């Protein structure tokens, strides 16, 4: 799999559920170009165990994403009707009622494939061709896309490994700082910390002060 970092985010038009109750056709990330950063994340399937913890965690931080002018969009290989049912299932029953950001339906699995996050068991046939066995689902992929539509950060976790929403916010802050001030962000940088200039202060000089 090749990284998408530094490349235009793959385009798609697909059904989605908005605001937890509105099914639309032809949802696209193009609507955010020149307007917002986008956090586009994949999760394996609706009505599972780790997935609702992540989806609720993103919703709980939506005020922080809104402050930073970031659109959050989720996606799985389920249909829009499965999304709708899950969105209307109470949290105490394993549902994600209360999630308002868009959930894209990738029932054909083509979006997950374009983004390089389609998980399955693979093998080779007798002619040496790579074949997929079983029912593929999406890995926990996450892509931070800038306002020009370019992927600037990606993270892909295996199915059992949930993500940190706070780390996603940290990466948004880092990208925003880089774009505003032309400085680069060192390890463990957080909003408000000193950054570094690519030409000027050397790494050794920076480290000597910290």
Image (spheres, rainbow, N blue to C red):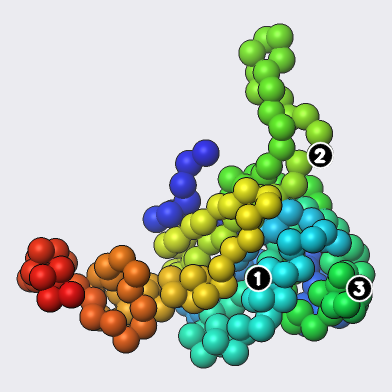
Q: Quadrant of the C terminus?
A: bottom left
Q: Picture coordinates of residue 157 (x, y %)? A: 59, 52
Element assignment for label 3: helix
Tell me whether circle 3 and circle 1 mark residues in contact (CB < 8 Å).
Answer: no
- Residue denoted by label 1: 73
Disc 2 is placed on an element classified as strand
Asked if residue 136 can be seen in this view, the reply is: yes
The residue wearing badge 2 is 135
* 3 or 1: tag closer to the N-terminus: 1
Tell me if residue 176 can be seen. Answer: no
Query: How far apart, in angstroms, are the residues tagged by discs 1 and 2?
Result: 23 Å
- x%, y% of residue 197? 16, 72
Reply above or below: 122 against 19. above
Q: Secondary structure at mark 1?
A: strand
Q: Is residue 54 above or below residue 132?
A: below
Taking the spot 82% from the left edge, 59% from the top edge, the residue there is 48
Q: In the image, residue 142 lies at what x, y percent?
A: 57, 60
How many neighbours does mark 3 have within 10 angstroms: few (below 14), some (14-19), or many (20 or more)? few
Looking at the rendered image, the disc whose residue lies closer to the viewer, 1 or 2, is: 2
Mark 1 vs 2, N-terminal side: 1
Crowd around label 1: few <14 · some 14–19 · many ≥20 (10 Å): many
Residue at the location (79% across, 56% down)? 45
Task: Give the distance between the C-alpha atoms of the residues marked 3 and 1, in whole angstroms.
Answer: 23 Å
Q: Nearer the viewer, residue 7 or 164?
A: 164
Going by the image, does 164 lie left or right of 95?
A: left
Lateral position of residue 120 relative to residue 84, left or right:
left
């Amino acid at each position: 799999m090749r990284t998408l970092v530094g490349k235009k985010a793959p385009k798609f038009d697909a059904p989605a559920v908005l605001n937890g109750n509105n099914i639309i056709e032809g949802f696209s990330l193009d609507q955010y170009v020149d307007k917002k950063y986008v956090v586009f994340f994949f999760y394996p399937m609706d009505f599972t165990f780790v997935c609702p913890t992540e989806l609720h965690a993103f919703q709980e931080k939506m005020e922080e994403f809104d402050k930073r002018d970031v659109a959050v969009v989720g996606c799985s290989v389920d249909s829009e009707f499965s999304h709708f049912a899950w969105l209307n299932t109470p949290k105490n029953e394993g549902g994600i009622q209360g999630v308002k950001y868009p959930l894209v339906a990738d029932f054909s699995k083509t979006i997950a494939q374009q983004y390089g996050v389609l998980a399955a068991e693979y093998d080779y046939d007798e002619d040496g061709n790579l074949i997929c066995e079983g029912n593929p689902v999406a890995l926990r992929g996450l892509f931070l896309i800038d306002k020009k539509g370019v992927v600037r950060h990606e993270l892909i976790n295996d199915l059992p490994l949930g993500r940190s929403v706070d780390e996603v916010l940290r990466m948004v802050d880092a990208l925003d700082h880089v774009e505003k001030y032309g400085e680069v962000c060192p390890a463990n940088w957080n909003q408000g910390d000193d950054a570094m200039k690519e030409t000027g202060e050397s790494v050794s000089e920076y480290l000597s002060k910290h």
